[in-house]
Image: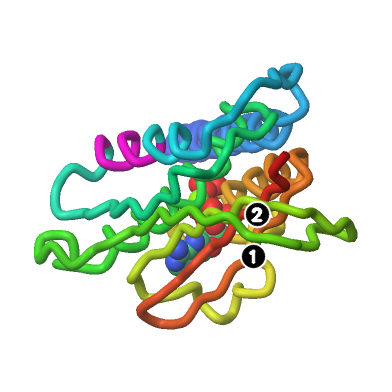
Amino acid sequence: MELQDSDKAKSLTEYTQVIIHEADRLQTLVDRLLEPHRKPREIGDVNIHEVCERVRSLILAEFPCGLQVVRDYDISIPDFRGDKEQIIQAVLNIAHNAAQVLAGESGRMAAGDAKIILKTRAARQVTLGKKRHRLALELHIADNGPGIPPEIADRIFYPLVSGREGGSGLGLTLAQTFVQQHDGVIEVQSQPGRTEFTLKFPLP
Ligand SMILES: Nc1ncnc2c1ncn2[C@@H]1O[C@H](COP(=O)(O)OP(=O)(O)OP(=O)(O)O)[C@@H](O)[C@H]1O
Ligand SMILES: [Mg+2]
């Protein structure tokens, strides 16, 4: 009888731990999902290369060994109006996925064969959403990783879709929200050996 009671107590404690853990996990999910709507946007001049440089140093700080983050900038691209922190978060979420996937490929970083490219270009006469713009900015974020798993490829921007152990599947959802809030779009092309996300924003 006593033994049964202590067993019961033990499994109750375990259940309680699971509930606490899940409640914390859900709180984190909700906090992240609400983030774009929480603070008022701070609109200013955004220089896309300052954004890229910030993202580059954040990624290199987290993956200091063997990852190359190559810049290919068209520095004639003008600033545009927007919330710089939101754009940084969007680009960081995309670049961070690439770095995580590359880090998961065993030996890849150690061999110095893991590469992310940040490339900026201006494009003329671009339709974003339904609106035509005389000038637009394109930021390409490419990696030489294994590609997006085909079984989730058409759903990666949906919340909670993840191909990663322990992934919450919110990074790209948030990136898309931030980009759309700037009248921009995200496109993606992926195959084994090369994945490329393209962000497009209207330019003044
Ligand atoms: N560059 C990439 N190469 C291969 N797969 C990718 C790449 N970018 C995204 N993915 C896939 O898309 C999934 C969804 O990405 P997303 O950033 O939305 O969520 P997550 O990284 O799983 O979790 P979170 O960003 O919330 O921590 C990833 O789990 C991964 O499987
Ligand atoms: Mg992510």
* Residue nearest the viewer, comparing 111 with 4: 111
Mark 2: C-beta under 8 Å from nearest atom of ligand 1:
no
Residue 30 in picture, x, y percent from top left = 69, 33
* Helix, strand or loop under label 2: strand
Choose top left, top right, bottom left or bottom right for residue 81: top right
Which residue is tagged 1?
Answer: 187
**Foreground label between 1 and 2:** 2
- Please tell me whether residue 149 is drawn above or below residue 133 in the rendered image: below
Colour approach in the figure: rainbow
Position of 168 relative to 181 (above/below): below
- Please give the name of the residue rendered at 77% of the width and 39% of the height, measured from the top-left corner: 181
The quarter of the picture where residue 42 lies is: top right
Instruction: Residue 28: give x, y in percent of width and height.
Output: 60, 32
- Reading the image, the residue beneath label 2 is 200
* Vertical placement of residue 157 versus 204, above or below: below
Please tell me whether residue 57 belongs to the stretch shown in magenta.
Answer: yes
Disc 2 crowd rating (10 Å Cα; few below 14, some 14-19, many 20+) is: many
| Percent position of residue 17, x then y | 51, 33
- With 3 as the anchor, is 153 left or right in this view? right
Residue at the right extreme?
130
Separation (CA) of disc 1 from disc 2: 8 Å
Q: Report which quarter residue 46 is drawn in.
A: top right
Q: Based on the picture, tell me whether residue 106 belongs to the magenta stretch.
A: no
Where is residue 43? Give x, y as percent: 70, 21
The one nearer the camera, 17 or 7, is: 17
> Principal SS element in the magenta part?
helix
Residue depicted at x 53% and y 32%: 47
Whether residues under marks 1 and 2 lie with C-beta atoms below 8 angstroms apart, the answer is yes
Q: Which is more toward the observer, 113 or 32?
A: 113
Q: Which residues are magenta?
A: 55-61
Q: Is residue 116 left or right of residue 114?
A: right
Q: Of the residues shown, which amino acid type is indicated by label 1?
A: Glu
